[in-house]
Amino acid sequence: MRPDRVEPIHEPATPIVDEEAAWVHQAAARFERASAQELLSWALERFHPRMAISAAGGVDGMALIDMAWRIRPDVRVFTLDTGRLPPETYELFERVREHYGIRVEFEQPDGQDVSALVTEHGPNLMYRSLELRLACCNVRKVEPLKRKLATLDAWVAGLRREQWKSRRNIAKVELDREHGGIVKLNPLADWTLEQVWTYVREHDVPYHPLFDKGYTSIGCAPCTRPVMPGEPERAGRWWWEQDTDKECGIHCSVALLGSMSDREREANGIPSPVEPRSVDPGEA
Ligand code: SF4
């Protein structure tokens, strides 16, 4: 199902109280109708080298790397190496290194934290409960991301509004209050999946091998599987959690999103923003 018309600029969770927030809000309005390349070009000029693209193997991140590399070949790219990534993700980043000459920055979890969690709850704790799944995401993704973003002034993500209901209201330029108030850019916010694939094919961008095996979203190996024709794009992520936000806390607060299911929202009178869009089986 196609999403309803979206409001281009979402209301910030916290009222604008400072000049920096007002500046970001104005930039979001200014770039709402700009192309992804125009936004990237502006951001690279303004923030490089204290800006990096976050890539996890998805086709959106790869398109962004290609666009940014054509503007600035020394663009920075980082990934969260959770320790549970499928081998194909490492193959992809080897191809990025060969194709673009970009040394992807691998951010890893704290070894002692992982050891304590896995010793206490086992390596496959994520299947036992939402709380344990989020604990795993927190140690392997959220905390490493915090450490990385503490070194940057801006980061770029491949989020799109049609991907999932929790992403419907993203702006192209945001103030990332969760990470020290740095700038977060979503240049593909208004792109469709078809547009991203068209870009990738036209520009011969390397893409994750699992997309040719029925996957439509790429994540950790134990938590990602192929989707059936007609299923939403992110249905293969944490597939056993049928009614949660399917987020890991890196693009939104775990406390705000991860712990509330659609049923809980309904019970609390909180509307579910939009149904995720189904995947056309021929598009990816
Ligand atoms: S996606 Fe799965 S394996 Fe990866 S950090 Fe989250 S729970 Fe752990």
Image: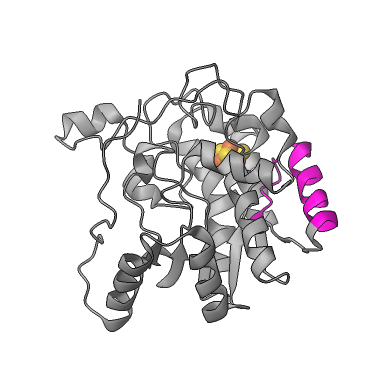
Vertical placement of residue 185 versus 252, above or below = below
How many callouts does the rendering have? 0
- Seen as rendered, the residue at the extreme right is 98
Q: Where does residue 80 sit, x and y in percent of width and height?
A: 64, 53
Image side of residue 118 versus residue 42, left or right:
right
Give the residue at x 54% y 58%: 143
Q: Quadrant of the C terminus?
A: top right
Q: Quadrant of the N terminus?
A: top left
Asked if residue 87 lies in the magenta stretch, the reply is: yes
Residue 196, visible in the rendered structure: yes
Image side of residue 83 versus residue 219, left or right:
right
Give the residue at x 67% y 62%: 77
Asked if residue 223 lies in the magenta stretch, the reply is: no
Q: Where does residue 129 sit, x and y in percent of width and height?
A: 46, 30
- Seen as rendered, the residue at the extreme front is 202
Vertical placement of residue 210 versus 157, above or below = above
Give the residue at x 40% y 52%: 252
Give the extent of the magenta segment: 79-99
- Seen as rendered, the residue at the extreme left is 269
Quadrant in which ligand 1 is drawn = top right
